[in-house]
Amino acid sequence: MDAASSSAHLFGLLRSLNLPAGDYAVFGSGPLLVRAIIERAGDLDVLCRGAAWEQAQRLGPTQEQHGVPVVSLFDGAVTLGVRWAVGDLDADDLINTAEEIDGLPFVRLEHVAAYKRLAGRPKDREHLRRLDEWRRHR
């Protein structure tokens, strides 16, 4: 596994940003990665609001990806945004209900699964299969 996709490396990059607690949560594949449901991820997607979004905008240029304003850092290893491009997900709810694991907030698995069902890409279907398997063996 290359360093850019290892969980320790990605979560270390996120920690180095010192984002304000309560104003962000890791979404996308990150909640699966932190639980070792998947072994690697190309990047971390982070939902932000308020002070965390203000800080993100000071850290790098704001760009548009899939119609959403984002700040991409560390050569794309960490992407911060204020909403999700797929589905009509309430970013505040996702952040407010996040679970803390190893000092970082992660969007709850049921929200990740709902998003991945909507997105329906091959990697999302594989992640859902792994999540179902993980849940059966718990």
Image (tube, grey):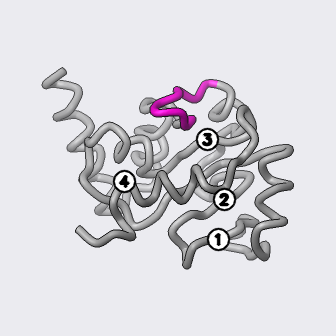
* SS class, disc 3: strand
Q: Depth check: give the residue in front, 10 or 64.
A: 10
Percent position (x, y) of residue 48?
A: 72, 48
Nearer to us: label 4 or label 3: 4
The reply, left or right, for residue 33 in relation to residue 52 is left
Q: Which mark is residue 80?
A: 2
Q: Which mark is residue 7?
A: 4
Which of disc 3 and disc 4 is earlier in sequence? Answer: 4
Which of disc 1 and disc 4 is earlier in sequence? Answer: 4
Residue located 27% across and 42% down the image: 36
Nearer to us: label 2 or label 4: 4
Magenta-colored span: 97-105
Amino acid on which disc 4 is placed: Ser
Percent position (x, y) of residue 99?
A: 52, 26
Amino acid on which disc 2 is placed: Leu
Which of disc 1 and disc 2 is earlier in sequence? Answer: 1
Q: Are marks 4 and 3 in contact (CB under 8 Å)?
A: no
